[in-house]
Amino acid sequence: MINLPQDQKIWVPWMRRAIQLALLGEGRTSPNPLVGAIVLDSSERLVGEGFHSGAGNAHAEIEALAEAGEKSVGGTIVVTLEPCCHEGLTPPCTEALIKAGLKKVVVGMVDPDPRVSGKGISRLKDSGLEVIEGVLNKECEGINREFIFRIRNGRPWGILKWAMSLDGRIGLQNGCSKWITNVPARDSVHQIRSKCDAVIVGGGTVRADNPLLTSRGKSTLEPLRVVFSKSLNLPKFAKLWDTKIAKTLIAYGPEGDEAFFSDLQDGPEKLRLNSNDPSELLKSLANKGCNKILWECGPLLATSAIADDCVQELVVFVAPKLLGGKSAMSPLNSFGFESIDSTYKLQHSFLDRKGHDLCWRLLL
Amino acid sequence: MINLPQDQKIWVPWMRRAIQLALLGEGRTSPNPLVGAIVLDSSERLVGEGFHSGAGNAHAEIEALAEAGEKSVGGTIVVTLEPCCHEGLTPPCTEALIKAGLKKVVVGMVDPDPRVSGKGISRLKDSGLEVIEGVLNKECEGINREFIFRIRNGRPWGILKWAMSLDGRIGLQNGCSKWITNVPARDSVHQIRSKCDAVIVGGGTVRADNPLLTSRGKSTLEPLRVVFSKSLNLPKFAKLWDTKIAKTLIAYGPEGDEAFFSDLQDGPEKLRLNSNDPSELLKSLANKGCNKILWECGPLLATSAIADDCVQELVVFVAPKLLGGKSAMSPLNSFGFESIDSTYKLQHSFLDRKGHDLCWRLLL
């Protein structure tokens, strides 16, 4: 941004507004990215605003142009992401921009989706529109970190969350873990769920905790609740089998005993995988349109998710309590490390207090 | 302070200065408290300052009066702690105040030491001096929290410190723990040691880590290094057996095999205890003049120190690393808790980042 030519800096405040608008769709646009747009008339007065509010709904540019109406003629559109030039669930935005008589297009970042990836900008330039690229580029990429990650890696951005006591315990020796953290911390977990496309637990968590795994209404679009089980040794009755509030997916490996399903009520979707690797599950979830998923599993699955490169971010809650206890009640299992140098190093991202508890977010 | 009569509020800034002076002695005055004093002449101009710099050295009042000289006549002394009225290693301060011709004495807190405990103030009043009590009382008590605790409980204030990874591990399965935290965190441990009168480890820590346990020169008075061993199954050679840099005390329970000492070079002091209870050791350390001690031990001793009420404060360093591992490499052993409600709850005191690491201080 600092390196922008002087005459382009005037777009910075407008791009900031477009980013604000984009964030209004957070947690609801997958597999699409967050996009915000504003339209200025030929005298550079704000005449339209829009954001993408969910796959299948109008794109941000179309929303903003609709509000601007005829005032867009000779005007400028400021948009966080390169306008699409392909027919998806909705028609290409480039054609709408050209048709609206705009003179100038200010773009935050190029769309990494190979169906666009610069072709949208070329189409606009070829049609005689002036295109200014890279205004608040880092910020525009920042709000779509998970979308960009999924496009580049073929699997969603993985967040692993756990809650532990000050002495690193996620439960007592008898398995009891309700509640290590207080209400503000648990509230914050619901908030994180509301921004994710799926929440994943293992069979052990279903058996031990019988969790609900919803955002408690913090999002109108509840995340997909995923049970990842090798054996399908799952309880007949569980809150997750009731799919009235939110969808449930039961994913299982080659050794899964499908006899379990004969007793199961209708509702949960079933997904047979070719292996028990967490990455295999995540590839399937990417294909289902997940940009960002949350691991809320026990130590065994958490450890294999990390080892299989399926965790990019950690959210660790630390409660000011001392539990003591045994190994199984620690957040992670063994990686087999022989030296401290070879252990995983994380990068600080955000530290906050949630009531009495700490919440530390880090990048892996 | 808020409730002080209007005409006493003028002493608040002077008491603040006296507190600043008192803190200059931090880590060096035990078994005595920290004390600071200032002397004002009859026109309320600052003419003397002093603080207590170590047991056997002059008291703060005497230092301040020495600087004031004859200007103290008709003046005021502002002192954080009630002046002593008993003959200790130095003569009673009350007599010096009376002799100096002071008119007024402003006192922050009453000395909890039963040899003083109001008797100093009575002596001054009886001699016709005006005494104003309780100016910045909480602050004056705050800087001597450990001294007050030792006087009331007969044992020093206990701090337990550990350094762990984000997944609650204090070492790898092979025992390796160097280094989980980075230089700024370890530096901060040396700083804490410099403010403590003794640092305690168990035999396991000596065998595994062969630590030095000094403040690395951060204090001119190194803390007493204490090895607390049930069995006296200790290595023949250890850095702690060399007492040129700092003193070492080997404390052991009734089952300790004293044959160990026949091989030991001269230097470390020996202390036979009647039991293996941490509180038994702390009583002995209180008798040796310790106001504040630091537990730097492994999970077994840490757990029994907590259970025996020998820990009042925790300092936990959390490094942004993932180690994985087994139970022995967790900060604490089992307390046998059956419900989360019955676990230890701590009170937040201070949260800080030391380089990449977190440092959380809490009260137990």
Image (cartoon, coloured by chain):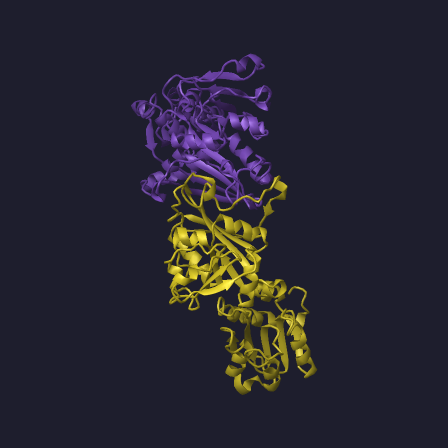
Chain colours: A yellow, B purple
Looking at the rendering, which quadrant does residue B19 occupy?
top left
- For residue B307, above or below residue A101: above
Residue B6 image offset from top left, x and y in percent = 33, 42
At horizontal 37% and vertical 40% (from top left) the residue drawn is: B343
Could you tell me which quadrant the N terminus of chain B lies in? top left
In the image, taking residue B336 as reference, residue B174 lies left or right, namely: right
Q: Is residue A248 visible?
A: yes
Q: Is residue B74 visible?
A: no
Looking at the rendering, which quadrant does residue B345 occupy?
top left
Taking depth in this image into account, of A108 and A332 the one nearest to the observer is A332
Q: Farthest residue toward the top? A: B262
At horizontal 40% and vertical 25% (from top left) the residue drawn is: B279
Residue B52 image offset from top left, x and y in percent = 47, 26
Residue B158 image offset from top left, x and y in percent = 43, 31
Taking depth in this image into account, of A317 and B95 the one nearest to the observer is A317
The mark total stands at: 0
- For residue B22, above or below residue A255: above
In the image, taking residue B139 as reference, residue A93 lies left or right, namely: right
- For residue A203, above or below residue A117: above
- For residue A236, above or below residue B361: below
Residue A315 image offset from top left, x and y in percent = 50, 53
Could you tell me which quadrant the C terminus of chain B lies in? top left
In the image, taking residue B46 as reference, residue B241 lies left or right, namely: right
